[in-house]
Image (cartoon, rainbow, N blue to C red):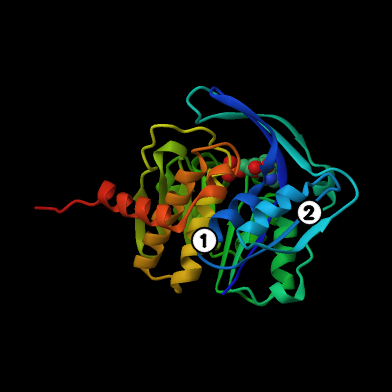
């Protein structure tokens, strides 16, 4: 069963202490699709400008991503420029040029409307709801958002969250959204808004998941070389929702494995600039690291 993703398709310029990448393929929908495509067919809805290169279309196509929903508008593709501090945990946005993304109004092709799993990338919560209005009720709606929408459109965001099953945000966003500093209290407040499952991303410190079954923590995979954290969150979402789509259901065990699969995909994403590592990744490599995750976190109580 296919997964529908709606989000940004971008040209990113990224500076890290280890190098710089200029106008490389990025955006939430790109990272998500590349990661999720290892588990189920992915249908992408987004917008690009006339400058969007055929070579980048080919990158997404090579992973089997359905691009019928990728609109091409007159103008330039969305551009984002980020700069990371030495620890790679904090980043500044140097520039955001919305370009054609400013006029984005997601139109869902008829063939996508029965998707059972949906990822609403970080866009205006009004547009996120517009997507849900155009499709049949899916099994799982997962959603991302950011500080800009939490402070800018709080009421619209709340209306959208009332229709969301899984919210994936970082710890600062969880605190901002709930008004609670303590993350356990924050999670309870956010789950009361609608999402039965909340995944709180904590960068190199991994993730915490809160659900009806309780909570679960997964570390980030300890890597010797982290090159570019851009897209880690969206790759996590791709691995997480991809796994749920391929496994079916939302039982406790399935959710826990989905968190580890999300962490696995995120760990590959950060090994190279942009989507480069996801381009060369194989299913065998994913399965091998997923197994190493078990070794990393499993212990027998005496
Ligand atoms: P992440 O590192 O998972 O937070 O996602 C990074 C991606 O988000 C980059 O590839 C950017 O192109 C994209 N991005 C940055 N700002 C925005 C924004 N305001 N709206 C949509 N996408 C954005």
Q: Nearer the viewer, residue 6 or 65?
A: 65
What x and y, as percent, mark residue 267?
45, 44
Q: How many marks?
A: 2
Instruction: Choose mark 2 or mark 1, whichever is in front.
Output: 1
Q: Which residue is mark 1?
A: 38
- Quarter of the figure that contains the N terminus: bottom right
The picture quadrant where one finds residue 259 is bottom left
What x and y, as percent, mark residue 55?
73, 48
- Judge the density around disc 1: few (<14), some (14-19), many (≥20) Cα neighbours within 10 Å: many
What x and y, as percent, mark residue 234?
57, 50
Is 68 placed above or below 90 here? below
Q: Secondary structure at mark 2?
A: strand
Q: Nearer the viewer, residue 217 or 86?
A: 86
Whether disc 1's CB lies below 8 Å from ligand 1 is answered no
Q: CA distance from mark 2 to mark 1?
A: 23 Å
Regarding residue 166, the answer to whether it shows in the image is yes
Q: Residue at x 38, y 32 (%)?
A: 224
Q: Which residue is mark 2?
A: 47
The picture quadrant where one finds residue 274 is top right
Q: Dots 2 and 1: beta carbons under 8 Å?
A: no
Q: Nearer the viewer, residue 114 or 202?
A: 114
- Judge the density around disc 2: few (<14), some (14-19), many (≥20) Cα neighbours within 10 Å: many
- Left or right: where does residue 86 sit relative to residue 156? left
Q: Residue at x 66, y 52 (%)?
A: 59
Whether disc 2's CB lies below 8 Å from ligand 1 is answered no
Residue 13: mark in rendering: none
Q: Residue at x 82, y 47 (%)?
A: 102
The picture quadrant where one finds residue 162 is bottom right
């Amino acid at each position: 069963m296919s997964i529908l993703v709606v989000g940004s398709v971008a040209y990113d310029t990224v500076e890290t202490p280890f190098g710089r990448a200029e106008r490389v393929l990025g955006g939430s929908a790109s990272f998500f699709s590349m990661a999720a495509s290892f588990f189920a067919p992915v249908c992408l809805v987004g917008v690009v400008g006339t400058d969007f290169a055929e070579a980048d279309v080919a990158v997404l196509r090579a992973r089997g991503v359905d691009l019928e929903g990728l609109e091409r508008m007159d103008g330039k593709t969305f551009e984002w420029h980020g700069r990371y501090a030495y620890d790679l945990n904090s980043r500044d946005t140097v520039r955001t040029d919305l370009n054609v993304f400013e006029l984005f109004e997601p139109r869902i092709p008829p063939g996508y409307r029965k998707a059972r799993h949906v990822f609403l990338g970080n866009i205006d919560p009004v547009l996120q709801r517009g997507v849900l209005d155009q499709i049949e009720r899916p099994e799982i709606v997962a959603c991302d958002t950011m500080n800009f929408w939490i402070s800018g459109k709080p009421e619209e965001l709340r209306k959208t969250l009332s229709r969301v099953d899984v919210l994936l945000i970082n710890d600062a966003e969880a605190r901002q959204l709930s008004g609670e500093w303590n993350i356990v209290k924050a999670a309870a407040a956010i789950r009361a808004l609608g999402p039965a499952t909340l995944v709180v991303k904590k960068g190199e410190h991994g993730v915490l998941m809160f659900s009806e079954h309780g909570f679960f923590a997964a570390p980030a995979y300890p890597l010797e070389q982290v090159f570019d954290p851009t897209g880690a969150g969206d790759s996590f979402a791709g691995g997480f929702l991809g796994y749920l789509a391929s496994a079916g259901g939302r039982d406790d065990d399935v959710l826990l494995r989905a968190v580890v699969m999300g962490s696995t995909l995120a760990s590959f994403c950060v090994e190279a600039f942009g989507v480069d590592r996801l381009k060369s990744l194989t299913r065998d490599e994913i399965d091998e690291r997923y197994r190493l995750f078990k070794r990393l976190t499993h212990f027998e109580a005496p």
